[in-house]
Image (cartoon, rainbow, N blue to C red):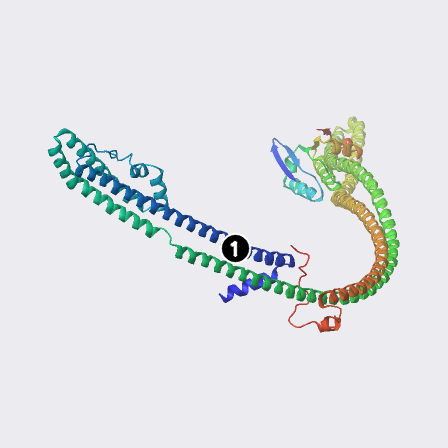
Amino acid sequence: MERKGSQLLQLLHDFTVNQRITVGFATVLALFLLCGAVSHFGIGSITDNAEEAIGGVSLDGVLAQKEADHLAWANSVNTFLLDERVEALKVQTDDHQCGLGKWLYGEGRTKAEKLVPTLAPMLKELEAPHQRLHQTAIKIDSLFREADPASGRAAAKTVYLEETVPALTEVQGLFKKIREEAKGQIISDEAMLASARRTKMAGAAITTIAVLVGLAISYSLATGLSKLLGDRTQAIRDSACQVAAAAGEISRGSQLLSDGASEQAAMIEESSSSLAEVSAMSKKTTELTEGSEQLMKENITRSAQSVKSLAELTKTISKIEEESGQIRQIITTIDAIAFQTNLLALNAAVEAARAGEAGAGFAVVAAEVKNLAGRTGEAAHNTQGLLDATVNRITSCAKAVKAINDDFDAIVESATIIGDKNATVTEASRQQARSIAEVSKAIEDSSQTTQQIASTAEESAAASEELSAQSEEMKNVVADLARLVYGPKADLDQLGDGPAARRPGRPAKTPLLLGRG
Amino acid sequence: MEIATEQSNGRARLRIKGNIDEKGAEALKAEIGRLNLESLSEVAIDLREVKYIGSSGIGKILLLYKHLTAKDGALRVENASANVYELFKELKLDTIFPVTAG
C-alpha cells in the first residue's frame, strides 16, 4: 500500500505542469460531475418513489372499489332471493364484463403487476373464484326460472349459500391478501422522506468533498508550480553562470585552435614542398623503369638470337668432334697403306737383287717406292700429330661451349627474371605516383580545411563573446522570473549564489519539464 | 596457374592455364625439369588459356628451346592469345621457333 502511494507520488512528480493542471482540473470536474450525478439520480429516485406511492394509493383504492362492488353484487343476489317482489336477477353474470373482470383482464391489471410484480400470481389465483362467483349467479337464475317460484327460490338459496357465499368469501380473502401485499410493497411516505433526506445528505457531502479536493489541488498546484519555477529559475541561473564560464573557455580554445591551425598550415606547406620533390623523383623512377623495360625487351630479343646461335654452335662443334674421329681413322688407314707399301718395296728390292743386272732398274723403282712409302708414313704421322692437337683444341672448345651453355642458361634466367622484377618496380612506381597524387590532393584539401578551421576558430571566438553577452541577458531574465515567482521582494541570493550554493538534495540538472507534453 | 602435360611417341604437349608471372615461370621450369628431354623430338606449348606472360616465362621457353635444339629437337608455341602473340612477334621469337596465334 505504502509502496503504491510512493509510486503515485513519483508518477505525479514526473508529470509536466500541463499534465498536472489537466489532472487537477479533471479531478475537480469529475467530483462535480459525481455530485451532479448523485443529485440527478437522487431526485430521480425521489420522483420514482413518489410515483410509486401515488400508484400504490390509486391501486389500493381501485381494489377496495372492486371488493365493494362484489359485496354489492352479492347483496343484489341476496335481495333477489329474499325479496319475493323481485322477479328477475339483474346482476352481471359474465366474469369478464363486471368491473373487476374488466380491470382483471384489461390494462388495470397490467399496470398493477408492473407496479408490484409479486401481485401477478395472486391476481392469477383470483381469476378462478371470481369466475365461479359469477357462474353461481347464472346457476341461481336458471334454477329460479326452470322450477316453480317456491322450489326454485329454495334451490337457488341453497346454491347461494353453498356456492356463491364460499366463492365470495374466497374472493374477499384474496382481495385482502392482494391489498396487504400491495401496501407492503409500495413505499411509504416516511420511507420516501428518509430516502430524500439521504439523497440530500449525499449531495451535500460530495459537494463538500469536491470543494475540499478542489482547494487541495489548487494549493498543491500553486505550491508545486512555485517550487518548480523556483528550482528551474535557480537551475537557469546556474546554467547562465556555466554558459558564461564555458564561453570563456571556448574563447581561449578558439585562440589555441587558431594558433594551432596557423602552425599546421606552415607544416602542410613544408610537407607539400617535400612531397613535390618525392613526386618528381617518383616520376623520374617511372621514366627510368619504363626505359629499362624497352631495354629488357631488346635484351630478350638479343638473348633469343644468341640462344639460337649458341645452339647451332654447340651442334656444329659436336659434328666437328664426330668428324675428327673419322679423319683419324682415314690417317690410320693411310699409315697402314704406307707400311704395306714399304714392305712391298722391300720385297721388290730383294727380288730385283736376285734378278741381278736385269733387275737393276726395278731396284731403283723399288727404292723410290720405299722412299715414297716412308714419306707417306711420315706425312701420315705428322698429320696424326696435327689432328690430335686439333682434336684437343676442339675438345677444349666444346668444353668452353658447354661452360658457356651452362652460364648462358643462368644469364638468360637471371636477365628474364630481372625483367619481371623491373616490371614490378615499374608498376609499383606508377602506383606510387598515383598515391603521391592522392596524398597531394589530400594535403591540398587539408590545407583548405586548416584555413576553414582558422576561419571557424575566429567565428567561434566571436560567437563565444556573443554567448557571454547572452548569458548576462539570461541572468536578467532569471531575475525577472524570480520576481514573478516570489514577488517584488525576491532576492536571488535567497536562491543561492551560483552552482556552489545549490540547495542540497536537488539534482543540478533536473530535466526541465515545463514545455513538455 | 595450371599445366597439363601429355607425352607420346617422343612428343610432348604442355597446355598452360592462367598467367605466367614470376611464380608461374618457376612452375613452368619445374614442369620442364620433369620432362625427359633426351627422348623428346618435339615439344609444343599451348598458350590458348594464357592472357599474360612475363619475361621470366619467356626465359624458360627460350632455355627449353636451347636444350631441345642441342639434341636436334624442335619447339613450337601454339594458340597464343592476341597480346601474347604480339609480344612474341615484338621480341622476334617467331624467328627462333614457330609461333601460331590462337
Residue at the spot 66% in from the left edge and 56% down from the top edge: A516
Quadrant of the rendered structure where residue A224 is?
bottom right
Residue A334 seen in render: no
Would residue A418 be found to the left or right of residue A35 on screen?
right
How many numbered tags mark residues here?
Answer: 1
Front position in the image: B45 or A1:
A1
Would residue A501 be found to the left or right of residue A274 on screen?
left
Provide residue A91's location: percent of width, then percent of height.
24, 35
Residue A462 seen in render: yes
Provide residue A41's location: percent of width, then percent of height.
48, 52
Return the residue at label 1. Answer: A34
Label 1: which secondary element: helix
Position of the C terminus of chain A by quadrant: bottom right
Front position in the image: A244 or A506:
A506
Front position in the image: A30 or A352:
A30
Front position in the image: A161 or B33:
A161
Read off the chain for label 1. A
Amino acid carrying label 1: it is Leu
Provide residue A467's location: percent of width, then percent of height.
81, 61
Relative to B2, residue A269 above or below = below
Residue at the spot 30% in from the left edge and 48% down from the top edge: A179
Quadrant of the rendered structure where residue A372 is?
top right
Provide residue A219's location: percent of width, then percent of height.
62, 65
